[in-house]
Amino acid sequence: MGRRFGKSIKRGGIARVRFKEILSKLDSFFHISISTSLMLFMTFATTYYALTRRVLGMSDVRAYFISLWAYGIFFVLGGAYCLRRRTFPEVDIFYRRISSQKLRRLWDIAIFLMMIFGGIGISYTTTYMAILSYILNEKDVNIGIAFQPPIWWYKFVGALGCYLITLQAIILFLKYLRTLK
């Protein structure tokens, strides 16, 4: 066992390996369970909305808005996950045309800094709006007079997604800086 892990055992490497394994399993579990449940929920709500509209001749607006909220949660939290896994789409129109490695590194650093500072600004704004919405007990009046659900909680999900994306951008930037040495 000592030869298998080498020097990392002497410096607390087993604990690090176990911690990374636990985090990896938790990450996979939450990704699968949350994304699957949101997708099933969105599918059910959209199907219910379409069936009530087509079969019964009356549409239930609540189902439409609930599926819209679930999609928003899926989108915002999925952004941080895609950034972590580096599966986000990249538009590299300018990057391909840069031939110098030095300029490419500067371009990467500029993109990371824009993501980080933009994320900090958006996170601050969304948190402020979510707190204000909670204080005012904001409700969605677009659905109708009888059904006015509170939507302040939905704004906190957006703020959480912005914080997660910003945190992932900072982590990726620090990893990128470590590879430059």
Image: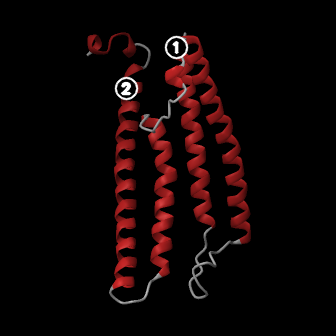
Residue at 39% in and 31% down: 20
- In the rendered image, the vertical position of residue 69 relative to residue 165, given as above or below: below
- In the rendered image, the vertical position of residue 42 relative to residue 55, given as above or below: above
Residue at 52% in and 24% down: 95
Say left or right for 35 vs 147.
Answer: left
Closest to the observer: 126 or 104?
104
Residue at 65% in and 33% down: 114
Quarter of the figure with the C terminus: top right
Say which quarter of the image contains residue 49.
bottom left
Label 1 Cα neighbours within 10 Å, binned few <14 / some 14-19 / many ≥20: few
Residue corresponding to mark 1 = 99
Mark 2: secondary structure: helix
Which amino acid lies under the numbered mark 2 shown in the image of this protein? Val
Quarter of the figure with the N terminus: top left
Closest to the observer: 134 or 3?
134
Which amino acid lies under the numbered mark 1 shown in the image of this protein? Ser
Residue at 55% in and 18% down: 104
Image coordinates for residue 65, horizontal then vertical, percent:
50, 72
Image coordinates for residue 57, horizontal then vertical, percent:
39, 89
Say left or right for 145 vs 129.
Answer: left
Image coordinates for residue 113, horizontal then vertical, percent:
65, 29
Label 2 Cα neighbours within 10 Å, binned few <14 / some 14-19 / many ≥20: some
- In the rendered image, the vertical position of residue 102 relative to residue 130, given as above or below: above
Residue corresponding to mark 2 = 17
Closest to the observer: 110 or 160?
110
- In the rendered image, the vertical position of residue 105 relative to residue 119, given as above or below: above
Image coordinates for residue 177, horizontal then vertical, percent:
57, 18
